[in-house]
Image (spheres, grey):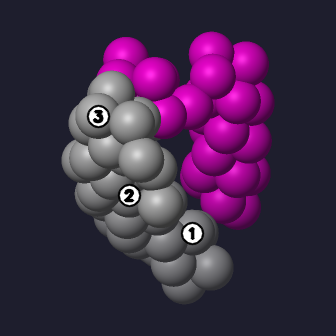
Amino acid sequence: MPQIKSAKKELRKGARRQGRNDAVRDELSLTLKKVKKAIAAGATDAAREALKGALKALDKATQKGVLKKNTRDRKKSRLHKAVNKIAKK
């Protein structure tokens, strides 16, 4: 445990930030799971609707600093490819 006052404060700040980041990550993973579930079921319309929410969640996570831009772009690209693949069938 930290002994110095500023180090104690930094520890508290880090715990708060971790809580916020975990909440954003949880929300993001839930939305991504919805898209993947719809893709696995082959439901094109449901996948497209879920994709909209997932893209929004990815953008918010990047805006808040939880994800990096390239990670967001890679995930978006792969989701789009998967949804387009089932739409062609």
Q: In this view, does 12 lie above or below 64?
A: below
Q: Write down the quadrant of residue 63 in the picture.
A: top left
| Secondary structure under the numbered disc 3 in the rendered image | helix
In front here: 44 or 40? 40
State whether residue 50 appears in this view.
no
Q: What element carries label 2?
A: helix
Disc 1 residue type (three-letter): Lys
Q: Which class describes the residues within 10 Å of circle 3: few (<14), some (14-19), or many (20+)?
A: few
Decide whether residue 34 is among the magenta residues. Answer: no
Q: State which tag comes first along the sequence, 1 or 2.
A: 2
Q: Mark 1 points at which residue?
A: 36
Tell me whether the residue at label 2 lies in contact with that at label 3, contact meaning CB atoms closer than 8 angstroms: no
Residue sitting at x 63%, y 16%: 69
Disc with the residue nearer the chain's start (2 vs 3): 3
Residue 7, x across and y down, in percent: 41, 35
Q: Nearer the viewer, residue 24 or 44?
A: 24
Amino acid bearing label 2: Asp
Q: Nearer the viewer, residue 56 or 47?
A: 56
**Mark 3 = which residue?**
5
Of circles 1 and 3, the one toward us is 3
Tell me the number on the disc at residue 74. Answer: none
Position of residue 74 relative to residue 40, above or below, is above
Q: Can residue 80 be seen in this view?
A: yes
How many angstroms separate mark 1 from mark 3 (CA)?
Answer: 46 Å
Q: How far apart are marks 1 and 2 (CA)?
A: 21 Å
Question: Can you identify the residue that label 2 sits on?
Answer: 22
Magenta span includes 68? yes
The magenta stretch spans which residues?
Answer: 61-89
Residue at left offset 39%, top offset 36%: 4
Mark 1 vs mark 2: in front: 2
